[in-house]
Image (cartoon, rainbow, N blue to C red):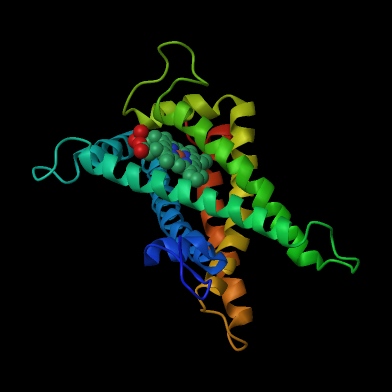
């Protein structure tokens, strides 16, 4: 930061200025959230290929690594996507932590008035649901991407998604953990999509109700799509 003679502080560049402001952090949260929602939606649709059988979903896993060929090498596009996702997750979490700390500093002692129940519930689910989701994502990568946890030695086979998913969810505690995490994801999306739309200035008096419903429907569709997989394995429909 440089200081002018008038005492006002100017950030070295516009991006930094944006990041330094509360609204800038909210915009970063909304933009990175939008990228993450798009990924989650595509991932959910990809997972549904499991209902077409092992050949389809395993071929899809190969496709994800071969896409971009011959311009790009094996798995290169996947690594680009992974890097963008990683950057978005880091920015999303950092902005969330900084906004929470700014909020606390602005209001170290709670107001004497009764808090808005919806706002409190939303903030609580976003904060703790977000923590659960972060734990879930780390576990999930070690589990179904790397096969380092949740499998017997030699049971996980790289690119054999169908067999790996069936083996994974045949253990009910693992399936239950995924179901709980998907509830957290649903609540996070329900509130997050709505907040993002507000930050980006899409909400006005006329469309408040319909955009609230749209956020809820998107969250429920993603929830239903994801939970259908562990539930189908537990029920023996996918085996
Ligand atoms: C029941 C829910 C889910 C199931 C059954 C599932 C299944 C899978 C499977 C089988 C893979 C490995 C794919 C492969 O190696 O080709 C995978 C990877 C991954 N999943 Fe999920 N997933 C679920 C939920 C989620 C959620 C909610 C997120 C994000 C919030 C997520 C993020 C990821 C990521 C980042 C990868 C790594 C992709 C890569 O770079 O290879 N998954 N998932």
- Compared with residue 201, is residue 193 higher up or lower down, i.e. above or below? above
User: Residue pushed farthest front?
Assistant: 5
From this view, report whether residue 164 is shown above or below residue 195: above
Q: Position of residue 136 (x, y in %)?
A: 56, 37
Q: Is residue 124 visible?
A: yes
Residue at image location 51% in from the left, 59% down from the top: 29
The picture places residue 83, in percent across and down from the top left corner, at 33, 43
Q: Looking at this view, name the residue that lies furthest to the bottom.
A: 206
Residue nearest the viewer, comparing 231 with 19? 19
At a point 68% along the width and 46% down the height, the residue shown is: 128
Say left or right for 174 vs 108: left
Q: Nearer the viewer, residue 136 or 8?
A: 8
Q: Is residue 53 visible?
A: no
**Ligand 1 found in image quarter:** top left
Where's residue 152, x and y in %? Answer: 49, 13
9 vs 141: above or below: below
Left of 139 or right of it: where is 187?
right
């Amino acid at each position: 930061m440089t200081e002018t003679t008038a005492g006002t502080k100017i950030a070295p560049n516009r991006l930094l200025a944006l990041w330094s402001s509360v609204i800038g952090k909210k915009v970063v949260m909304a933009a990175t959230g939008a990228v993450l929602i798009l990924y989650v939606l595509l991932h959910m649709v990809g997972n549904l290929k499991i209902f077409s059988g092992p050949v389809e979903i395993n071929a899809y896993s190969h496709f994800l690594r071969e896409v971009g060929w011959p311009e790009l090498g094996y798995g290169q596009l996947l690594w680009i996507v992974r890097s963008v996702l990683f950057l978005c997750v880091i920015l999303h979490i950092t902005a969330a932590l900084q906004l929470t700390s700014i909020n606390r500093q602005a209001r170290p002692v709670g107001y004497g008035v009764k808090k808005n129940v919806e706002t409190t519930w939303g903030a609580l689910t976003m904060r703790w649901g977000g923590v659960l989701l972060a734990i879930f994502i780390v576990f999930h990568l070690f589990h179904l991407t790397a096969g380092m946890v949740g499998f017997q030695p030699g049971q996980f086979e790289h690119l054999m998604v169908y067999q790996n998913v069936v083996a994974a969810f045949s253990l009910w505690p693992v399936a239950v953990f995924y179901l709980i995490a998907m509830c957290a994801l649903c609540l996070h999306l329900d509130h997050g999509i709505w907040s993002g739309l507000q930050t980006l200035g899409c909400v006005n008096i006329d469309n408040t109700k319909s955009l609230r419903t749209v956020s809820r429907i998107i969250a429920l569709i993603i929830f239903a799509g994801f939970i259908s997989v562990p539930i189908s394995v537990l029920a023996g429909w996918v085996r």
